[in-house]
């Protein structure tokens, strides 16, 4: 049974994701020039890094001094090497620098290099190629690190299976979250983030519940409609993450497009990888005999996580935790 094999591998992939966890995620360093040569620092380490015993801090060039959040580089300006000590594997840092002259720079630093080299020539606007590359990477990372978004996509696959209808369902999800992402970033739509997170959790619970119901429910007849409606909410979730990074004002449309492309590349990459491996792996582990119980168990795992997040986030909204 082709569909069962595909769903079986999806289930195994979900268990692997939950067991091994995700990459460290992106930390953010935002430097704003408040006076010539003086910068205000905003350093936001990734949540996964905060849980580790290791402390990751930016280390500035020797001619720069730091007093609290103020970085003073004097007449020489912010040139030289910025280094990030003890940056864990699979972690990265997104740097955004804004100068008094209105120019800005956005760049990503990988754990393999741990450094970024700034020259006097960098005191200028980022090229469109830099903006495109940086925000595509941020988009890919966000979808791969956002387990709630991935579980919703997994729930859609469990609901629809690897059929042609999955293409239309994922397309509807894409169109919806792209729409609200743009509207939210442009401040046309504003919804409290905690409310968004609660509805996202509910969406995971719903698709898991519907995938267990074998009757011809509305969700089974029109999964694209469910994907579109909840995709509108997931787009608001993406917007919240994008605001943390910041967007270059002179390249707002390009950075928004690049982030969206990154989200789609990551999403389609996961679906394609699961589908491709689903044709191979089940043959090695006796697919049909264990497919149904594993798929059933994985559906309960997805639904249980959705229920847990719904309760915990609702409790946070009500001030109970």
Image: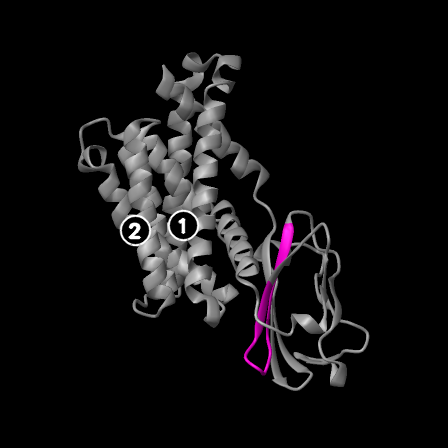
Quadrant of the snapshot with the C terminus: bottom left
- Circle count: 2
Q: Earlier in the sequence, mark 2 or mark 1?
A: 2
Tell me the crowding category of disc 1: few under 14, some 14 to 19, or many 20 or more residues within 10 angstroms, Cα based: many
Q: Tell me if I can see residue 321 in this picture.
A: no
Q: Is residue 280 left or right of residue 51?
A: left
Secondary structure at numbered mark 1? helix
What's the residue at 69%, 52% (across, down)? Answer: 111
Indicate the quadrant where residue 179 lies: bottom left
User: Comparing marks 2 and 1, which lies closer to the viewer?
Assistant: 2
**Among all residues in the image, which is located at the extreme bottom?**
35
Residue placed most toward the observer, 78 or 229: 78
Secondary structure at numbered mark 2? helix
Q: Position of residue 94 (x, y in %)?
A: 60, 61
Circle 1 sits on which residue? Answer: 309
In space, the residues marked 2 and 1 are separated at their CA atoms by: 22 Å
What's the residue at 32%, 58% (across, down)? Answer: 180
Q: Position of residue 318 (x, y in %)?
A: 35, 64
* Vertical comparison of 118 with 108: above or below: below
- The part of the chain drawn in magenta is 91-106
* Vertical comparison of 207 with 229: above or below: above
Q: Is residue 62 magenta?
A: no
Q: Position of residue 243 (x, y in %)?
A: 46, 66
Q: Is residue 150 left or right of residue 66?
A: left
Helix, strand or loop: magenta stretch: strand
What's the residue at 64%, 47% (across, down)? Answer: 90
Tell me the crowding category of disc 2: few under 14, some 14 to 19, or many 20 or more residues within 10 angstroms, Cα based: many
Q: Position of residue 142 (x, y in %)?
A: 49, 51
Circle 2 sits on which residue? Answer: 176
Residue placed most toward the observer, 207 or 73: 73
Give the label on residue 7, or none: none
């Amino acid at each position: 049974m082709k569909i069962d094999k595909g769903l079986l591998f999806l289930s195994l992939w979900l268990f692997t994701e939950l067991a091994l966890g995700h990459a460290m995620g992106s930390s953010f360093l935002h430097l704003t020039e408040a006076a010539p040569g003086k910068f205000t620092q905003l350093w936001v380490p990734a949540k996964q890094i905060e849980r580790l015993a290791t402390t990751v801090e930016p280390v500035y060039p020797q001619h720069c001094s730091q007093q609290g959040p103020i970085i003073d580089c004097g007449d020489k300006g912010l040139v030289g090497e910025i280094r990030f000590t003890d940056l864990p594997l699979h972690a990265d840092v997104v740097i955004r620098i804004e100068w008094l002259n209105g120019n800005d720079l956005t760049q990503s630093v990988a754990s393999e290099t741990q450094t970024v080299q700034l020259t006097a020539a960098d005191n200028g606007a980022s090229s469109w190629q830099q903006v495109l590359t940086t925000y595509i990477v941020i988009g890919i990372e966000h979808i791969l690190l956002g387990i709630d978004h991935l579980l919703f996509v997994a729930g859609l696959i469990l609901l629809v299976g690897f059929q042609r209808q999955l293409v239309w369902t994922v397309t509807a999800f894409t169109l919806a979250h792209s729409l609200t992402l743009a509207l939210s970033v442009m401040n046309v739509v504003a919804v409290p983030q905690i409310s968004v997170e609660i509805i996202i959790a509910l969406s995971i619970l719903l698709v898991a519940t519907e995938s267990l119901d074998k009757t011809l429910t509305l969700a089974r007849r029109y999964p694209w409609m469910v994907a579109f409606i909840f995709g509108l909410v997931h787009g608001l979730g993406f917007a919240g993450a994008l605001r943390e990074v910041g967007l270059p004002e002179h390249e707002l449309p390009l950075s928004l497009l690049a982030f969206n492309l990154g989200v789609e590349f990551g999403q389609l990459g996961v679906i394609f990888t699961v589908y491709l491996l689903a044709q191979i792996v089940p043959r090695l582990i006796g697919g049909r005999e264990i497919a149904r119980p594993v798929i059933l168990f994985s559906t309960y795992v997805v639904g249980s996580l959705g229920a847990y997040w719904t309760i915990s986030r609702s409790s946070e909204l009500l001030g109970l935790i």
